[in-house]
């Protein structure tokens, strides 16, 4: 499980019932939901929550750096609560499922000096793509 709710409480983010429900929906290891999926799950817990409230909460969480937006090949943005744990993403090119992966090695350190072109490299994003078992079958 991610520690999103704990992080938000520690930051003093005002957890209204709507914000709490959005955070609860997002909390988990491999949760990469779209805003519409967050809204659908949130309304199961709190039927009166509006789509605008969900979008606003997601925007605040991204601004706080507690959730990251993951964009993949023109598909809807997805929201990743594991913003504080280094990881990469494995994306199914068929259905768009996203999984967190933790490959060995450091992609920043692995970039040869002659290919840095004088940049001071501070980070790297590696995305693995393929077909999940359901799409491959």
Image (tube, helix red, strand yellow):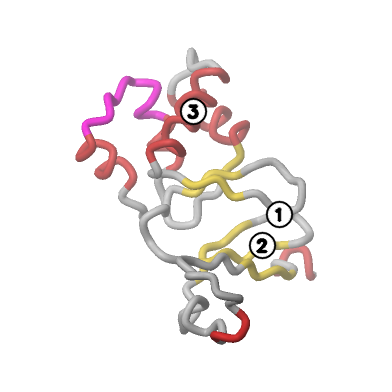
Nearer to the camera, 28 or 52: 52
Separation of disc 1 and disc 2 at Cα?
6 Å
Separation of disc 2 and disc 3 at Cα?
24 Å
Which comes sooner in the sequence, label 2 or label 3? Answer: 3
Quadrant for the C terminus, please: bottom right
Q: Residue at 47% across / 83% down in the picture? A: 105
Q: Nearer the viewer, mark 1 or mark 3?
A: 1
**What residue did someone put label 2 on?**
91
Contact, mark 1 vs mark 2 (Cβ under 8 Å): yes
**What residue did someone put label 3 on?**
42
Q: Residue at 39% across / 36% down in the picture? A: 23
Q: Is residue 128 above or below residue 68?
A: below
Q: Residue at 61% across / 58% down in the picture? A: 98
Q: Residues within 10 Å of mark 1 (few under 14, many from 20)?
A: some
Which comes sooner in the sequence, label 1 or label 2? Answer: 2
Q: Residue 52's quadrant in the figure?
A: top right
**What residue did someone put label 1 on?**
96
Q: Residues within 10 Å of mark 2 (few under 14, many from 20)?
A: some
Quadrant for the N terminus, please: bottom left
Q: Which residues are magenta?
A: 12-21
């Amino acid at each position: 499980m991610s520690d999103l709710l704990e992080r938000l409480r520690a930051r003093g983010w005002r957890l209204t019932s709507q914000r709490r429900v959005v955070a609860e929906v997002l909390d988990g290891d491999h949760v990469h939901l779209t805003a519409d999926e967050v809204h659908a799950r949130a309304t199961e817990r709190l039927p009166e929550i509006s789509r605008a409230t969900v979008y606003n909460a997601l925007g605040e969480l991204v601004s706080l750096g507690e959730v990251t937006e993951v964009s993949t090949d023109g598909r809807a943005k997805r929201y990743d609560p594991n913003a504080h744990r280094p990881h990469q993403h494995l994306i199914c090119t068929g259905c768009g499922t996203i999984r967190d992966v933790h490959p060995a090695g450091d992609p920043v350190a692995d970039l040869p000096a002659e290919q840095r072109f004088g940049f001071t490299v501070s980070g790297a994003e590696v995305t693995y793509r393929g077909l999940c078992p359901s799409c491959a079958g």
